[in-house]
Amino acid sequence: MTEKVALVTGCSTGLGVQMAKALANQGCNIIPLARREEKIKEVAQMLISEYGVEAYPIQCDITNTEKVEAAIDKALQHFGHIDILINNAGTGAVAPAEDITDLQFENELNIDLFGTFRVARAVAKKAMIPAEYGRIINIASMYGLVGNKIAPASPYHAAKGGVVNLTRALAAEWGKYNITVNAICPGYFWTPLTKDTLDTEWFKEYAKGAIPQERYGKEGELDTTAIFLASAASSYVNGVMIPVDGGYTAI
């Protein structure tokens, strides 16, 4: 994927950085996009020094349409094209459904679902449809496919379920432009956001019974799925959800 340009949202930490590194290792130039400017500058410098690719960080709040549009314009002014989009930015409200506030629910939908749409819409309209080429990878969740009894998170389930069907809708609309739209549905992976929960003894015991492989995902185990969906190898794969969850959704 040398000379391809990949824009990765939520690329300040965690899975976003891992997938950016995986694509950079395949020769992609990377646009790390997130709210925390100092973090994405650090990520960009790391990608440049470790992989020898070009990295161009852009600070952006994906809940603001004007800022999203401006960010995509800025990316296109720099690179001239955006070939790959990984919609990774997200959040997660955890509380019993009866205690979830309107604001929590609205915030979840605004970031995880509407934010995904805002960025996809701008990238498709400004870059991929004119080029008649694109690979869009939405990061949903296994919780977008099933419910759960261990960590009540109804807004997250609703938002990620929306991302799942948004993926199908966009795949149906944009396939004629040689744009594929697919989703990865990760299971439990260690990240700065999940570490405090996953490291508890009670959650480790739960994982042994809930996950057929009886463990969490390790760093790098999401990478090959992202590379596959971003590359020419998946040219006839469109509108699908790929769980990377150790078998959690199989039982």
Image: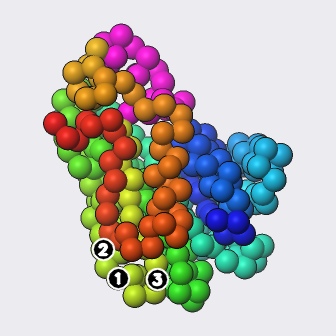
Q: Quadrant of residue 99?
A: top left
Q: Earlier in the sequence, mark 3 or mark 1?
A: 1
Residue pictured at 39% horizontal, 14% vertical: 200
Q: Position of residue 32 (x, y in %)?
A: 66, 55
Q: Quadrant of residue 138?
A: bottom left
Quarter occupied by the C terminus:
top left
Label 2 sits on residue: 169
- Of tags 3 and 1, the one toward the viewer is 3
Q: Are marks 1 and 2 in contact (CB under 8 Å)?
A: yes
Which element is circle 3 on? loop
Quarter occupied by the N terminus:
bottom right
Tag 2: Cα neighbours inside 10 Å, few (<14), some, or many (≥20)?
Answer: few
Which element is circle 1 on? helix
> Disc 3 to disc 1, how far (Cα)?
10 Å
Label 1 sits on residue: 173
Q: Position of residue 25 (x, y in %)?
A: 68, 51
Label 3 sits on residue: 178
- Of tags 3 and 2, the one toward the viewer is 3
In the image, residue 4 lies in the stretch drawn in magenta? no
Q: Is residue 125 above or below residue 155?
A: below
> Disc 1 to disc 2, how far (Cα)?
6 Å
Q: How is the image coloured?
A: rainbow
Q: Position of residue 245 (x, y in %)?
A: 34, 39
Residue 30 visible somewhere in the drawing:
no
Which element is circle 2 on? helix
Magenta stretch in the rendered image: 188-204
Q: Are marks 3 and 1 in contact (CB under 8 Å)?
A: no
